[in-house]
Amino acid sequence: MVAIQENIALAPLTTLGVGGPARYFVTASSPQEAVEALDWARQHNVAVFLLGGGSNLVVSDAGFAGLVLHVAIGGVTVRDGGGQRVYSVGAGLEWDTFVARAVDDNCAGVECLSGIPGSVGATPVQNVGAYGQEVAQSIVRVKAIALDSFQPVTFTRDDCAFRYRHSRFNSADAGRYLITSVDFALIPNGPPRLDYADLQRHFADALAENKTPSLVDVRQAVLAIRARKGMVLDENDPDSRSAGSFFRNPVVTVAQYQHIANACSEPMPHYAAAPGEVKLAAAWLIEHAGLRRGFAIGEAAISGKHTLALINRGHATAADVLHLRDHIQRRVYERFGVELEPEPVLLGF
Ligand SMILES: Cc1cc2nc3c(=O)[nH]c(=O)nc-3n(C[C@H](O)[C@H](O)[C@H](O)COP(=O)(O)OP(=O)(O)OC[C@H]3O[C@@H](n4cnc5c(N)ncnc54)[C@H](O)[C@@H]3O)c2cc1C
């Protein structure tokens, strides 16, 4: 039987480092242990929260009155076929450990996602993405346990309903499945993805000479660019004590975009989205609403390196973080009429 612990501090289990304890806590290292823990929660009539690496999470100062189930299911298996290599990866494996392995194996498909904290099992939840790549491009299957029936379920990529920072797992089916493993189809000896402007700038000389950087080169470049923005975890960098980007880039209609752009005195960055829609840059909106890097409320601040990251300066409370969130949302709404949607998951509020 899995060991259920009581009153476990959650702040140290998150990258932002705020919030109170979990009333109950358990680590599940296999699907069987996960089912045992879920069954315990049902018998004791307590709510369950699934925890990976705690890197997209804000825990309330009061903590969580239910069972936090830490998913630590490991293991990687590999099979080749049809010009692809499919990695079946346990949900509890650290995401960047898997990316490093894929790059070492010279398999393309996740190299731009280097340095993102957290677990493999959480990556389908918000369709993790960065530098021109997202996991929806390489995921072929997600294996899970249904929280209501405890039965195993397999989702194909199409079943997952992936879109920008969304999937069924954080929308229609939020909180209904415990992901146990994810299958990624990568391309052995495939070329790196170099769509993103930061990467094109980084490799401008090589690209001008028609040289393609290796997957290792791209991983190193992504890690270096991310470090400059405080977006890789580094205990010596206080700007990395965050939950990543706190706001999604807002997607608006073309008409809304034109209305906002007409009212701006300088060109507003914008990107292609679905037909009839335009993606705006949340960081630009925040800066042009008059909020600068380093702006703080209590011990919570906008990172000095990246306008989208809200950081804990050391002794922040969850209340500080949410006051700062509310202030930023209000200022952007007053200035542009755009509602910024927070990215991290809130627990215990
Ligand atoms: C410095 C920094 C940089 C970041 N950069 C990026 C980036 O570039 N791109 C990006 O997309 N994100 C980024 N993030 C956000 C974060 O790393 C990702 O969202 C990551 O996938 C979260 O993984 P986790 O294991 O820490 O999830 P957690 O924070 O533990 O959980 C997040 C959500 O996933 C659910 N969940 C976790 N595991 C499972 C499971 N096995 N089954 C079902 N549900 C589960 C949780 O219940 C919760 O709802 C960044 C975060 C930080 C701190």
Image (cartoon, rainbow, N blue to C red):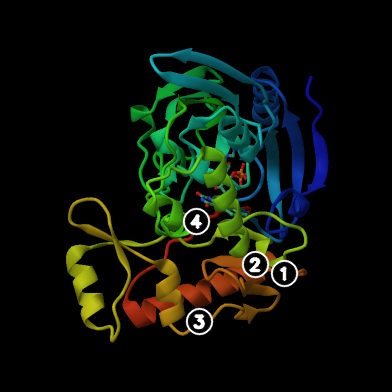
Q: CA distance from mark 2 to mark 1?
A: 9 Å
Is residue 51 something one can see in this rendering? no
Q: Earlier in the sequence, mark 2 or mark 4?
A: 2
Q: Earlier in the sequence, mark 2 or mark 3?
A: 3
Q: Horizontal placement of 65 versus 108: left or right? A: right
Q: CA distance from mark 3 to mark 4?
A: 19 Å
- The amino acid type found where label 1 is placed reads Ala
Q: Within 8 Å: ligand 1 and the Cβ of disc 3?
A: no
- The amino acid type found where label 2 is placed reads Ile
Q: Which residue is mark 3?
A: 291
Quadrant housing residue 135:
top left
* Disc 3 secondary structure class: loop
- The amino acid type found where label 4 is placed reads Glu
Q: Earlier in the sequence, mark 2 or mark 1?
A: 2
Q: Horizontal placement of 318 versus 258: left or right? A: right
Residue at image position (66%, 37%) is 46
* Disc 1 secondary structure class: loop
